[in-house]
Amino acid sequence: MSRECYLTGKKNLVVNSVTRRGKARAQGGVGRKVTGVTRRVQRANLHKRTIRQGGVTKTVWLSANALRTLSRGPYQGIELL
C-alpha cells in the first residue's frame, strides 16, 4: 500500500536542500554562496483513516486537506468513520 492520498492523490515530493554561507548583500556582505545541494524528501501530511465507500469499509491514507473535506459531510459517496 503506497503512501498516497486516496482522494487527492497527494504524495511525497523529492526536493533539494540548499546550504548557503556568507552574509547577504543587503546587510553589508558580499552575498550568500551555495555550498551544497542535497536531495531530501518532503513528506505529505497523510493520516491513516477508515472510510465507508459504497457500503464497504476500508482503511486508507488521507491527506489533511481531504480529512477537512470529509468532515463537512459525504464526498462522492465516501464517508469518514
Image (tube, rainbow, N blue to C red):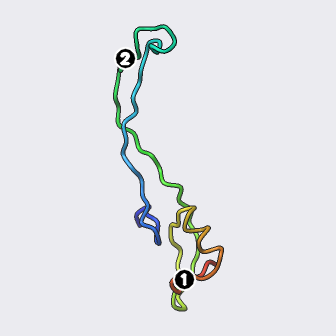
Which residue appears farthest toward the bottom when viewing the image?
55
| Label drawn at residue 1 | none
The correct choice, above or below, for 14 with respect to 72 in the image is above
Judging depth in this view, the residue of 52 and 32 nearest the camera is: 32
Check disc 2 and report the residue beneath it. Answer: 33
Q: The disc labelled 2 sits on which kind of residue?
A: Lys
Mark 2 secondary-structure assignment: strand
Q: Nearer the viewer, mark 2 or mark 1?
A: 2
Identify the image quadrant of the C terminus. bottom right
Mark 1 secondary-structure assignment: strand
Label 1: how many Cα within 10 Å (few below 14, some 14–19, many 20+)? some
Residue 77 % position (x, y)? 53, 87
Residue at left 59%, top 71%?
69
Identify the image quadrant of the N terminus. bottom left
Which residue appears farthest toward the front when viewing the image?
26
Residue 25 in which image quadrant: top left
Residue 78 in which image quadrant: bottom right
Residue at left 62%, top 78%?
80
Q: Is residue 45 left or right of residue 42?
A: right
Check disc 1 and report the residue beneath it. Answer: 78
Residue 52 % position (x, y)? 56, 84
